[in-house]
Amino acid sequence: MYTLVIVLTLILAALLIITILLQSSKGTGLAGSAFGSGASAVMGVRRTADFLSKFTTILAIIIGVLCISSNYLIPRGDNGQESFIEKTGTTAPASTPAPAPAPPVK
């Protein structure tokens, strides 16, 4: 289930990036120039901008919900398995004090 949520989140994130790039900025943007003006001729420039804006908001909300829900679906080590650090039993080496500076030569 966790893998499904992660894959779905990645697909929606790619779709969100494409949707953001299609929106027109203060200049022409990618919506009208790079992909032709076929979509804006059918729906009109204003309706296309409204649709892309709403679609961007919906995608962002869905990705946010999926990210929060994936936190609860992360497989935990509650089933008695030890983590890698617990298995190896190693600890961080103790820091040794720095050597004293040598006395000045006369």
Image (tube, rainbow, N blue to C red):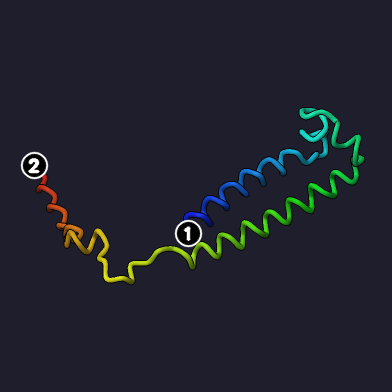
Q: Tell me residue 92's x, y (percent).
A: 20, 59
Query: Residue sitting at 68 percent across and 40 percent down?
Result: 18
Q: Is residue 81 above or below residue 50?
A: below
- Spatial distance from mark 1 to mark 2, Cα to Cα? 66 Å
Q: Nearer the viewer, residue 76 or 53?
A: 76
Query: Residue sitting at 77 percent across and 29 percent down?
Result: 35
Q: Nearer the viewer, residue 67 or 28?
A: 67
Q: Badge 2 is on which residue?
A: 105
Snapshot quadrant of residue 28? top right
- Which disc number belongs to residue 23? none
In this view, the residue farthest toward the left is 106
Q: Is residue 82 left or right of residue 19?
A: left
Q: Tell me residue 43's x, y (percent).
A: 90, 41
Q: Amino acid at mark 1?
A: Tyr
Nearer to us: label 1 or label 2: 1
Q: Is residue 36 above or below residue 26?
A: above
Q: Quadrant of the C terminus?
A: top left
Query: Residue sitting at 79 percent across and 35 percent down?
Result: 31
Q: Amino acid at mark 2?
A: Val
Query: Residue sitting at 22 percent across and 64 percent down?
Result: 86
Q: Earlier in the sequence, mark 1 or mark 2?
A: 1
Q: Badge 1 is on which residue?
A: 2
Q: Is residue 86 above or below residue 15?
A: below
Please say if the residues under marks 1 and 2 sit with CB atoms less than 8 Å apart: no
Q: Is residue 12 left or right of residue 4?
A: right
Snapshot quadrant of residue 78? bottom left
Q: Tell me residue 37's x, y (percent).
A: 85, 31
Within 10 Å of disc 1 (Cα), the crowding (few <14, some 14-19, many 20+) is: some
Snapshot quadrant of residue 57? bottom right
Secondary structure of the residue carrying numbered label 1: helix
